[in-house]
Amino acid sequence: MNLFNLERAFKQKKERKWNRLYVAIDAHGTLIKPYHDHIEFYPGVREVMLWFNSRHDISTILWTSSHQKDIQNLLIEAEKIGFRFNYVNQNTAEENTDKACFDQKFYFNVLLDDKAGFEPETDWELIKLELIRIGEWNKYGIPA
């Protein structure tokens, strides 16, 4: 199994000499608990998100169907605990090519979404363990 496509994404990045990886992260049921009256992050979110943000070669994309005011509240709460997103529901850095059209589906390398099988109570820790296993976690000073 390729845990959340992490190993393959980093391997392709190296082989294809990409400058950046993009991680799309769903909100409810993945990043935060599915309450709609308050925001509560799952265990492990902060540590992994801080690691993503510490990398100059990783962009994070908040992937959500939430209303704009709820998105703004989530972004504020994320900043309060130290992390941010590069994009919300889009990736303007990657443009259409002769082989790919991103007009209706933006580009990403890794998708973290409960609708795609993500288990938020355990999988944030598994992401960290996978990044340690493939030798990426310590590259930017985040302790294992």
Image (cartoon, rainbow, N blue to C red):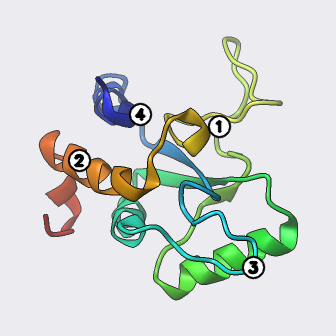
Q: Name the kind of residue labelled 1 in the image.
A: Glu
- Mark 2 and 3 residues: CB-CB less than 8 Å, in contact? no
Q: Nearer the viewer, mark 3 or mark 1?
A: 3
Which quarter of the figure has residue 72? bottom right
Secondary structure state at the residue bearing disc 3:
loop
Earlier residue among tags 1 and 4: 4
In the rendered image, the residue lying farthest to the top is: 99
Circle 4 is placed at which residue position? 18
Q: Position of residue 58 (x, y in %)?
A: 44, 51
Circle 2 is placed at which residue position? 131
Say which of 39 and 91 sits in front. 39
Secondary structure state at the residue bearing disc 2:
helix
Say which of 51 and 2 sits in front. 2
Which quarter of the figure has residue 45? bottom left
Q: Residues within 10 Å of mark 1 (few under 14, many from 20)?
A: few
Earlier residue among tags 2 and 3: 3
Q: Name the kind of residue labelled 2 in the image.
A: Leu
Quadrant into which the C terminus falls: bottom left
Mark 3 to mark 1 CA distance (whole Å): 35 Å
Q: Name the kind of residue labelled 4 in the image.
A: Trp
Which quarter of the figure has residue 12? top left
Q: Nearer the viewer, mark 2 or mark 3?
A: 3
Say which of 107 and 28 sits in front. 28
Circle 1 is placed at which residue position? 94
Report whether 29 appears left or right of 58. right
* Residue 96 shows in this picture: yes
- Residue depicted at 32% across the width and 34% down the height: 3
Circle 3 is placed at which residue position? 37
